Amino acid sequence: MEAKIKAFMDEVKARNGHEPEFIQAVQEVAETVIPYIAQHEIYNGKNILLRMVEPERLISFRVAWVDDDGEIHVNRGYRIQMNSAIGPYKGGLRFHPTVNASVLKFLAFEQVFKNSLTTLPMGGGKGGSDFDPKGKSDDEVMRFCHAFMTELCRHIGPNTDVPAGDIGVGAREIGFLFGAYKKIRNEFTGVLTGKGLSWGGSLIRPEATGYGTVYFADSMLKTRDESFEGKNVVISGSGNVAQYAAEKVLHLGGKVLTLSDSGGYIYDKEGIDEEKLAWVMDLKNNKRGRISEYVDQYPNAEYHKGKAPWEVPCDIALPCATQNELNGDHAKTLLKNGCMCVSEGANMPSTPEAIHAFHEARILFAPGKASNAGGVATSGLEMSQNSLRISWTRSEVDDRLKGIMNDIHNSCIEYGKEDNGYCNYVKGANIAGFVKVADAMLAQGVI
Ligand SMILES: NC(=O)C1=CN([C@@H]2O[C@H](COP(=O)(O)OP(=O)(O)OC[C@H]3O[C@@H](n4cnc5c(N)ncnc54)[C@H](OP(=O)(O)O)[C@@H]3O)[C@@H](O)[C@H]2O)C=CC1
Ligand SMILES: O=C(O)CCC(=O)C(=O)O
């Protein structure tokens, strides 16, 4: 089996060798899915995984825009349309200086499996730009978004490809992008998700990724007769996913000890309660400030510059910032301090060494493609509401989200439970996600 996996990866590396994040994401899937393919005659000899690692379409384009001083800037825009076997391409847009084809291909590839797991009919895609919204005025962000959509609008549509937010793309950016699409195409359609409530958005979409990550962790904890009640929880990031993960932890009786951004982390041993979290939301979403400012407001807390929060002893860790933010050494520290559960809110935040350490220690570990799928699932619910031209209530959407996260958990158990009773959620998510897409590809023939 190892030789088969190696031969497959050699072929992938020959084509994509200069794309480390993409290779990392494919390797993880290959290790779990290739043995499954070998045991299942219908998938054998069809090169399905080889077809799945090649984007159906990779669009790259110039985005020229003018700053407040009249200076012209040029950024690169992308949309990776990875796989449409089970529905229109669906996945977020990331605006961050580190964006390149490798990062977006890893995200688009993972999105295919994640969207398949949601039980909804969505293919996988991802896009974005190396544009950095940090430090830009609202007008500059608007001009950039309008310029970006001027090209992107040719490639997307409510039945073709439906983007949403990701790092650096929140409610403000989705508004500007939607405005440009509507103006250029002269149509009001559900072409983006994460929209404002008064113009086609869904209740619970802002909360969904963070809430879903905690719902998934709660399902895992239940398998060991555990819960969030009274648990110490360490969270990284302080953006959309981290904020609502923290909120749901508080609803379930846990204590949130940390939040972070790319500058460092804050540790509040008294706990970040609802009032403090509301202050962080205002700091991050309105004032667009830095998490270090927390200690000015709450002087009993500590700020650890340039560090990640995994050194703080905890029961549960929720990485909610970015890829590869939790490495093998961090994992060892978490385990040494008694951490029993890691649920990924971010995409691929744990390195392969960290995942290996979690599996060796047999703790509960959920990969992002399963545990953070609540965001895109609720985007799918936004698409359904747009098609029906109705809006569901908060509790209707939240109940559906809970149901979907529970279904994903069950799928992971079905495909990931090992003979010794341990559930390998990575294996479960990869195989369950693969089967649905592979069956659709088989039915549609070689195209
Ligand atoms: N939004 C969604 O619905 C979904 C998001 N995700 C994933 O969740 C993660 C967070 O996304 P989201 O909350 O939406 O994004 P936001 O832009 O709202 O927040 C990102 C957070 O991560 C921090 N961060 C970014 N890069 C780094 C870095 N290199 N090192 C340390 N911290 C960093 C940011 O800090 P700073 O401000 O300093 O950059 C910020 O606190 C991403 O991996 C995303 O792909 C997954 C599923 C859905
Ligand atoms: O809601 C969406 O369509 C995108 C969510 C996303 O980008 C993700 O799941 O990583």
Image (tube, rainbow, N blue to C red):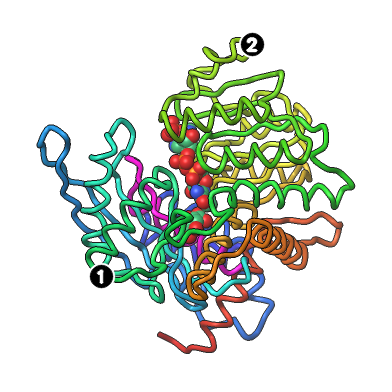
Tell me the CA gap for discs 2 and 1.
53 Å
Q: Is mark 1 within 8 Å of ligand 2?
A: no
* Residue 114 magenta-highlighted: yes
- Local packing at callout 2 (Cα closer than 10 Å; few below 14, some 14-19, many 20+) is few
Tell me: is circle 2 under 8 Å from ligand 1: no
Q: Which residue occupies 62% across, 30% down?
A: 329
Q: Which residues are magenta?
A: 91-117
State the image quarter where residue 246 is shown. top right
- Tell me if residue 323 can be seen: no
> Residue 304 sits in which quadrant?
top right
Count neighbours of disc 1 (C-alpha within 10 A) and say few if under 14, some if 14 to 19, many if 20 or more: few
Q: Secondary structure at mark 2?
A: loop
Q: Quadrant of the C terminus?
A: bottom left
**Residue beneath disc 2:** 300
Instruction: List x then y, in percent, for residue 377.
Output: 58, 62
Pick whichever of labels 2 and 1 is earlier in the sequence: 1
Q: Circle 1 is placed at which residue position?
A: 186
Residue 220 highlighted magenta (yes or no):
no
Residue 254, how many percent across, how many down? 76, 34
User: Which amino acid type is marked by label 1?
Assistant: Asn
